[in-house]
Image: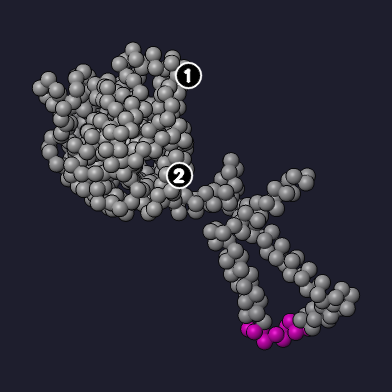
Amino acid sequence: MRKKSSYKVNRLFKWLSPGLFVKRWLLISTTGLLLTILGGAIWVKLTPIYRILSAVSRFFDFITDVIPNYISGPLVIVVGLLLVLWGQSRTVGSITDVLLPDRDEELVDKLLAHRRLNKGPKIVVLGGGTGLSTLLRGLKEYSNNITAIVTVADDGGSSGRLRREIGVLPPGDIRNCIAALADEEKLLTELFQYRFEAGDGLTGHSFGNLFLTAMSEITGDLEQAVTASSQVLAIRGTVLPATLSDVRLWARMEDGRIIEGESNIPKAQGKIQQIGCNPPNPPALPSAIAAIQEADYIIIGPGSLYTSIIPNLLVPEICDAIAQAEVPRIYVCNIMTQPGETEGYTVAEHIQAIDQIAQQKLFDAVMVHRRSPSPKTLRRYADDRSHPVYVDREAIASLGRRIVIANIMEEDPETGYVRHDSVRLARVLLRWYSGNPH
C-alpha cells in the first residue's frame, strides 16, 4: 500500500518537471477559476452572495480563533493546492486512458522523453545497407532531429525488380531506415521485411518495397512517398534519398574490366580502381543539402564502402555541403573487410577511397573497433576471405584524421557474424560529439 502511494506521489511530482509547461498551466487554470468566481460576483453586484461571503468571513474568523492564522493559512493553501493537483492529475489520467490504453508507459514519461528528444542535436547520417539502419536504431534514443541520407543505386533483389519493371527508384535501403526509426520498430521491421513466398509476380518482393512503391505512385516521387510514409508511421527523424536521379553504378577494376550495376560489383571478385555512376554528377535533393547545412553533427557510415557510402558522395553537391560544414564530422569504419569491395583494406585505405571520390576533406575523425572478434568468428570470416580492418595509426594520422577507438561490436555466437552494436555505437558517437567544440 505504501509503495503504491509513493508511486502516485512520485508520478504527481513528475508533472511538475521542468520543460513540460505543466506548472504554468496549473497556475493559469487556478487564476482562471478565481477570475470566473470574481467575474460572477461583480456581474450580480454581490447581492445574492453577500450573506454567503459574510458567513464565510465569520467562519474564517472562528477558525483563526481556534487555530492561529500562521498555521491555518498555510494549511488551507496546501489543501487547496493538493485539490487542484489532484483534479488535474485525474484529468490527465482520463486522457492517458484514451491515448495510452495499454499503459505500457506513463503519459508523463512519454512527454518527458519527447521533450528531451526534440532538444537533441540535428544529426545527419549518410550511408546505406544494414549498417545505416543499425546506427539509426541507436541514435533515435538521443534525438528526434535525425536525417538519414540514403543511396538509391541499389539494383538487386526486390528493389532491382521494381526498378526495372515499374521504373521507380529502389526503395530497399530507405525501407530499412524507416523501419529502424519507427517507434514500433520490431513490429514494423517484421512487416516491412516480410517477403511474399507465393503469388504471381509477388514472390520475392518485400511488403516494405511494395508499400513505398505504391506511395511513390500516389504522391508522384520517392521524396514525397517517404515523407508521407514517415508521417503515417510516426518515425523519429527524416529519411531522404541522396538524389532523385536514376543513377546506376559502374566500377573499373584493376584488370581493366568495367562492371556495371551495384549488385554486380562485389561479385566481380577484383580490386576496384575507380567507381562512378551514370548519369555522372547527379543533382542532389535540395532538402538533403538543407539538412547538411543545418546539421550539428555529421556521421558517414557504417556500410559497404563502394556500394553504400560512396554512391552518396558521387553527388557533388553533397560532398561540397559536407566539406563546408563547420560541425563535428566523423566516419564510422567497418569492422571487417568485404570480399569484392575492400578485401585487404586498412582503415587508412578506406579513408583514401573516400578522399579520392570527394577530392576534399569530408570528416575530421574515424571511429574504429577496439578488439578483434573471437577465434571462431575469425575462422568463419576467413573462409569468405574477410578479415578485421587493420588500424594503421601512422597512415591515418598522416591523412589528418583523429582516431576514436571504442568497443562497438556485437558478435552473434550462433551465426558467427559481427556487426556494430547499435546502442554502444550511438552512445560513443554522442559522447564524442559532446566532447568536441561546436
Question: How far from the left and from the top, in percent, is residue 344?
Answer: 27, 22
Tell me which residue sits at (62%, 80%) in the image. Answer: 39
Residue that numbered label 1 is attached to: 413
Near mark 2 (Cα within 10 A), the count class, few <14, some 14-19 or many ≥20, is few
Q: Which residue of the protein is positioned furthest toward the left in this rendering?
A: 256
Q: Amino acid at mark 1?
A: Pro
Which mark, by number, is residue 431?
2
Q: Left or right of 315: which side holds 433? A: right
Lower position in the chain sequence, tag 2 or tag 1: 1
Mark 2, secondary structure of its residue: helix
By secondary structure, the bulk of the magenta-drawn segment is best described as: loop
Q: Percent x, y for residue 427?
A: 46, 40
Indicate whether residue 43 is drawn in magenta. yes
Q: Is residue 42 left or right of residue 196?
A: right
Question: Considering only vertical position in the picture, is 424 above or below 67?
Answer: above
Q: Mark 2 against mark 1, which lies toward the viewer?
A: 2
Res 56 visible = yes
Residue 344 or residue 420, whichever sits in front: 344
Drawn side of residue 306 relative to residue 47, left or right? left
Name the residue rendered at 65%, 79% in the picture. Answer: 38
Q: What secondary structure is marked by label 1?
A: loop
Q: Quadrant of residue 388?
A: top left
Q: Depth check: 246 or 406 in front?
A: 406
Residue 95 percent location from the top left of the image: 58, 53
Part of the protein shown in magenta: 42-51
